[in-house]
Amino acid sequence: MPERPCRPPGWTAASAWRPSTCITCLEDAALEPLKRAGVERYFAQRFGYGVSAGYPPSWLEPLDIVRGSDQRLAAGMVFCLHCVLKLPEEHFGVMVGGNFVLQEHGVEFLDRSGLELRVL
Protein backbone atom coordinates (compact mmCIF):
# COMPACT_ATOMS: atom_id res chain seq x y z
CA MET A 1 0.00 0.00 0.00
CA PRO A 2 1.48 3.41 -0.92
CA GLU A 3 2.15 6.03 1.74
CA ARG A 4 -0.60 8.63 1.97
CA PRO A 5 -0.93 11.79 4.07
CA CYS A 6 -3.91 12.26 6.36
CA ARG A 7 -4.91 14.48 9.25
CA PRO A 8 -6.10 13.42 12.68
CA PRO A 9 -9.83 13.93 13.30
CA GLY A 10 -10.86 17.52 13.84
CA TRP A 11 -7.64 19.13 12.62
CA THR A 12 -9.08 19.81 9.18
CA ALA A 13 -11.95 21.71 10.80
CA ALA A 14 -9.41 23.78 12.77
CA SER A 15 -9.03 26.21 9.87
CA ALA A 16 -12.55 27.50 10.56
CA TRP A 17 -12.07 28.10 14.29
CA ARG A 18 -12.22 31.71 15.44
CA PRO A 19 -12.59 33.47 18.78
CA SER A 20 -16.03 32.69 20.25
CA THR A 21 -16.23 29.22 18.62
CA CYS A 22 -17.98 26.94 21.10
CA ILE A 23 -15.84 24.21 22.66
CA THR A 24 -18.49 21.56 22.01
CA CYS A 25 -18.17 22.35 18.28
CA LEU A 26 -14.49 21.34 18.40
CA GLU A 27 -15.19 17.85 19.65
CA ASP A 28 -18.24 17.46 17.41
CA ALA A 29 -16.05 18.29 14.39
CA ALA A 30 -13.42 15.81 15.55
CA LEU A 31 -15.93 13.01 15.96
CA GLU A 32 -17.50 13.45 12.53
CA PRO A 33 -14.75 11.68 10.53
CA LEU A 34 -14.65 8.94 13.16
CA LYS A 35 -18.40 8.43 12.72
CA ARG A 36 -18.01 8.28 8.93
CA ALA A 37 -15.24 5.69 9.32
CA GLY A 38 -17.36 3.64 11.75
CA VAL A 39 -14.82 3.89 14.60
CA GLU A 40 -16.47 6.43 16.94
CA ARG A 41 -17.00 3.74 19.57
CA TYR A 42 -13.20 3.49 19.93
CA PHE A 43 -12.81 7.18 20.82
CA ALA A 44 -11.61 6.94 24.39
CA GLN A 45 -11.03 10.36 25.97
CA ARG A 46 -11.69 14.06 25.77
CA PHE A 47 -10.52 15.72 22.58
CA GLY A 48 -8.28 18.33 24.16
CA TYR A 49 -7.37 20.70 26.96
CA GLY A 50 -5.90 24.14 27.54
CA VAL A 51 -2.16 24.61 27.93
CA SER A 52 -0.64 27.19 30.27
CA ALA A 53 1.63 27.52 33.26
CA GLY A 54 -0.04 25.53 36.00
CA TYR A 55 0.29 25.65 39.73
CA PRO A 56 -0.15 22.80 42.19
CA PRO A 57 -2.23 21.07 43.29
CA SER A 58 -3.97 20.63 39.94
CA TRP A 59 -1.48 21.79 37.28
CA LEU A 60 -4.45 21.83 34.90
CA GLU A 61 -5.71 24.69 32.77
CA PRO A 62 -9.47 25.20 33.19
CA LEU A 63 -10.11 24.80 29.42
CA ASP A 64 -11.48 21.30 28.86
CA ILE A 65 -12.38 20.46 25.26
CA VAL A 66 -15.27 18.04 25.67
CA ARG A 67 -18.83 17.69 24.44
CA GLY A 68 -21.27 19.56 26.62
CA SER A 69 -18.85 22.35 27.56
CA ASP A 70 -20.28 25.86 27.67
CA GLN A 71 -16.83 27.42 27.18
CA ARG A 72 -15.83 29.36 24.06
CA LEU A 73 -12.49 29.95 22.41
CA ALA A 74 -10.77 33.31 22.86
CA ALA A 75 -7.82 34.84 21.03
CA GLY A 76 -4.53 33.93 22.71
CA MET A 77 -5.70 30.55 24.01
CA VAL A 78 -3.18 27.73 23.66
CA PHE A 79 -4.54 24.22 23.63
CA CYS A 80 -3.65 20.63 22.88
CA LEU A 81 -5.94 18.64 20.62
CA HIS A 82 -5.57 14.90 20.47
CA CYS A 83 -7.42 11.84 19.37
CA VAL A 84 -7.19 8.66 21.41
CA LEU A 85 -8.54 5.48 19.86
CA LYS A 86 -8.52 2.25 21.85
CA LEU A 87 -9.33 -1.19 20.53
CA PRO A 88 -9.47 -3.25 23.74
CA GLU A 89 -10.22 -6.54 22.01
CA GLU A 90 -7.02 -6.06 19.97
CA HIS A 91 -4.99 -4.80 22.97
CA PHE A 92 -4.08 -1.79 20.87
CA GLY A 93 -4.46 1.97 21.09
CA VAL A 94 -3.10 5.11 19.48
CA MET A 95 -2.94 8.77 20.44
CA VAL A 96 -2.15 11.54 17.95
CA GLY A 97 -2.09 15.14 19.09
CA GLY A 98 -0.68 18.59 18.64
CA ASN A 99 -0.58 22.06 20.15
CA PHE A 100 -2.34 25.10 18.74
CA VAL A 101 -2.73 28.79 19.54
CA LEU A 102 -5.83 30.72 18.55
CA GLN A 103 -5.15 34.11 16.96
CA GLU A 104 -7.77 36.63 15.82
CA HIS A 105 -7.43 35.28 12.25
CA GLY A 106 -7.65 31.60 13.24
CA VAL A 107 -5.53 28.79 14.62
CA GLU A 108 -1.81 28.28 14.28
CA PHE A 109 -0.26 24.83 14.63
CA LEU A 110 2.71 25.05 17.03
CA ASP A 111 4.46 21.73 16.47
CA ARG A 112 7.36 21.68 14.00
CA SER A 113 6.36 18.32 12.59
CA GLY A 114 3.46 19.77 10.59
CA LEU A 115 -0.12 18.64 10.36
CA GLU A 116 0.36 15.72 8.01
CA LEU A 117 0.44 12.21 9.44
CA ARG A 118 2.07 9.64 7.19
CA VAL A 119 0.20 6.35 7.00
CA LEU A 120 2.26 3.50 5.60
Image: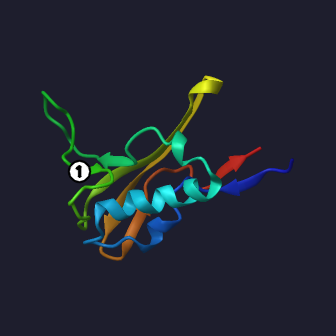
Can residue 10 be seen here? The reply is no
Q: Is residue 86 left or right of residue 24?
A: right
Q: Is residue 17 left or right of residue 92?
A: left
Residue furthest right as drawn: 1
Q: Amino acid at mark 1?
A: Leu
**What x and y, as percent, mark residue 96?**
53, 43
**What x and y, as percent, mark residue 107?**
39, 66
Q: Look at the picture and state if 53 lies above or below 5.
A: above
Can residue 80 be seen here? The reply is yes
Q: Is residue 57 left or right of residue 47?
A: left
Q: Look at the picture and state if 92 lies above or below 24.
A: above
Name the image quarter holding the C terminus: top right
**What x and y, as percent, mark residue 118?**
69, 48
Instruction: Name the residue located 76 percent from the left edge and 54 percent from the top edge.
Output: 4
Q: Nearer the viewer, residue 2 or 94?
A: 94
Q: Nearer the viewer, residue 53 or 48?
A: 48
Task: Kindly identify which residue carries mark 1.
Answer: 63
Instruction: Name the residue located 66 percent from the left edge and 56 percent from the top edge.
Output: 6
Instruction: Name the residue located 25 percent from the left edge and 63 percent from the top edge.
Output: 76
Q: How many marks?
A: 1
Residue furthest top as drawn: 91
Give the colour scheme of this rendering: rainbow
**What x and y, as percent, mark residue 108?**
42, 63
Q: Nearer the viewer, residue 53 or 71?
A: 71
Instruction: Name the residue located 21 percent from the left edge and 38 percent from the top edge.
Output: 60
As helix, strand or loop, the secondary structure at mark 1 comes to: loop
Within-10-Å neighbours for mark 1: few <14, some 14–19, many 20+: some
